[in-house]
Image (cartoon, helix red, strand yellow):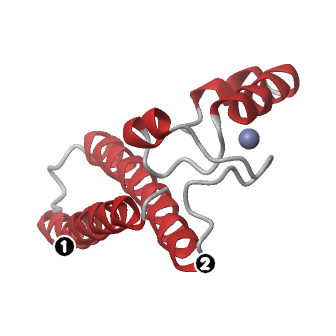
Amino acid sequence: MKSEHIQNFKKLFETQRQSLVTAIQWTDHEYTIRSEDLSDEVDLTAVELEQGMRLRLKQRELVFLRKIDQALERIQQGTFGFCESCEEPIEESRLKARPTASMCISCKEQEERMEKRTNPFSVLRTA
Ligand SMILES: [Zn+2]
């Protein structure tokens, strides 16, 4: 991959990283206000449900943040754009659709087939 392409990805990751960090901090802020606002009349179940939803959202954001960090690390190590399994270059169309991808399509599909065999619920996992 051309180094200017890699620089573009780097910029994209840094922008995404910044907005994720802001979003995660904002979730924390919301939490604090919410718990202070709690009174006896508040329907606890609804609050708990909402907090559970926020927590799941935050977990997704944290997973994404980790993927971005790993991608930035690969850029630094010079391995970005190469499949971590077969070490062949990852298709550019795939990187455009999913910039944090660390495997080429065929390796990823192979991995998903293996996972499906062992755990049918893993389909829900994001790549
Ligand atoms: Zn591969």
Query: The C terminus lies in which quarter of the figure?
Result: top right
Numbered disc 1: secondary structure: helix
| Between 10 and 31, the one nearer to me in the picture | 10
26 in relation to 126, above or below: below
Observer-side mark, 2 or 1, equals: 2
Instruction: Name the image quarter holding residue 80.
Output: bottom right
Image location (x, y in percent) of residue 34: 17, 63
> On residue 52, which mark appears?
none
Q: Tell me if residue 6 comes above or below residue 93 in the rendering.
A: below
Q: Dots 2 and 1: beta carbons under 8 Å?
A: no
Badge 1 crowding class, 10 Å Cα cut-off, few under 14, some 14 to 19, many 20 or more, is few
Name the amino acid type tagged 1. His
Query: Seen in the image, is 4 located left or right of residue 100?
Result: left
Ligand 1 appears in which quadrant? top right
Judged from the image, the secondary structure of the residue bearing numbered disc 2 is helix
Q: Residue at x 28, y 61 (%)?
A: 12
How far is disc 2 from disc 1 in space, using C-alphas?
35 Å
Residue ID for mark 1: 29
Residue 67 location (% of width, % of height): 51, 59
Q: Residue at x 44, y 41 (%)?
A: 98
Q: Nearer the viewer, residue 99 or 51?
A: 99
Above or below 67: residue 110? above
Q: Which residue is mark 2?
A: 77
Residue farthest along the bottom direction in this orientation: 76
State the residue in front, 96 or 69.
96
Q: Is mark 1 within 8 Å of ligand 1?
A: no
Q: Residue at x 43, y 49 (%)?
A: 99
Residue 108 percent coordinates (x, y): 69, 34
Label 2 CA crowd tier, 10 Å (few <14, some 14–19, many 20+): few
Q: Pick whichever of labels 2 and 1 is earlier in the sequence.
A: 1
Query: Which residue is drawn at the image coordinates 65% and 39% (left, top)?
Result: 104
